Amino acid sequence: MKLLPFLAFFIATCSAGAVSIDAIYFGQTHLHKPDNPYFGTVADRDVFIKAHVTDPAAIASPAVFATLSLNGNFLTVALTGPANLPTSIPDGLGVVQHSTANTFTGVIPAAWVKKGLQVTVNVGAVQTTVTDMKVSAPTKVIMTMTDVEYFANTSGDYPAGTFAELEAKWPVVDLEVRRLNNVVFRELVIPPRSDVSAQGVRIKSKAEYQGQTGLAFDGEQAAALEWNAALKRAAGRSGRWSLYYLNVYGAFAGGQAGGFAGVGSGTDIGILHHELGHAMSLPHWGDNGSYPYKGAMHGISPPGGVYNQTHAGPAWAFHQPTNAFIPPTVQPGNPGGKTAGTYKV
């Protein structure tokens, strides 16, 4: 009988000795391990931390915490997780299924996210230190946005919360949108169109355009590009202090962008996202020979019917406002009826 307490102590000690920190992920817009070549953090913005702590005996979870070290100062961040340690957590690109149910998570405060930050995850005597958080500049983007109404005022707009969502998805500290609404041009000058030999015209309606040119109304983007470029030039500093974007209302419009500026339909969030990518000098994926995410990767098939089989890649996205994990693969029951389990575009 006297041996039982000693045996219990021996088993508990051995079990605790098997505790392992298998992986650490960080996230602001995507979840990455610090050794991933695409890992990086933006200064002065919260960083989500996720530790995979396991034990073959599934022991009761000990305290798990992260120690932050910056310029001789220290801060302890408690990480919350399951009551018992999982025996294992499948990991790796194309394999990991991110969840808070079996991992330990917390938030590194924005004030600590600066060059020189080191993070140590502690579980009893077991610890792992990340010495390089690859902290970049605390980038702020100012977007000067103008809503131009063609011929008459309209009521269209982007969905509520669009710009807060943009700010969360971009690698920035702040997105400041300076927006001028309801600029109504009841009379327009549409530039010449050499592709169809159409002269420039001054019109008050789409019908007038057809009457003067014999063509269906077009050229709304050409006009918008000229207005937007003029506003950008007028601001000085080579137009580089702010991204200029012009929304088109009252006329069907696609979009066009580049050089930290763009125009597009003021009601289509897909066009907005696409053109803002071009405004940031991003090319079309399929046309870029160096784009890394093409075809099957890590055992996952590419999306069907997409040019050059390009896709979003294997990293999970992270929605910081809600601490939600977004898988890189199409999920069952998706609105577009895409093939579940393939990469997202």
Image (cartoon, rainbow, N blue to C red):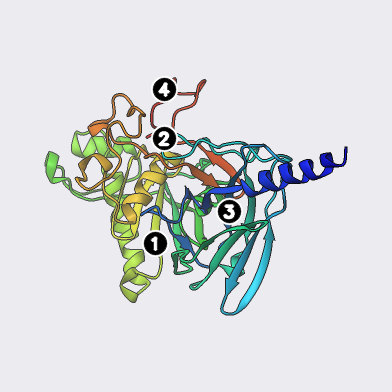
- Of the residues tagged 4 and 2, which is closer to the observer? 2
Residues at marks 1 and 4, CA–CA distance in whole angstroms: 34 Å
| Side (left or right) of 54 relative to 205 | right
The residue labelled by disc 3 is 49
Residue 27 visible in image? yes
SS class, disc 3: strand
Q: For the point 87% across and 42% down, which residue is it?
A: 2
The tag earlier along the polypeptide, 1 or 4, is 1
Local crowd size for mark 2, using a 10 Å CA cut-off: few (<14), some (14–19), many (≥20) = some
Residue at the (33%, 60%) spot, across then down: 260
Using the image, tell me which numbered label, if any, was put on residue 243: 1
- Image coordinates of residue 80 in percent, x first then y, are 70, 49
- Tell me the CA gap for discs 1 and 3: 32 Å
Q: Position of residue 315 (x, y in %)?
A: 43, 42
Which residue reaches farthest front?
2
Looking at the figure, which quarter contains the N terminus? top right
What is the three-letter code of the residue carrying label 2?
Answer: Gly
Marks 3 and 2, Cα distance to the nearest angstrom? 20 Å
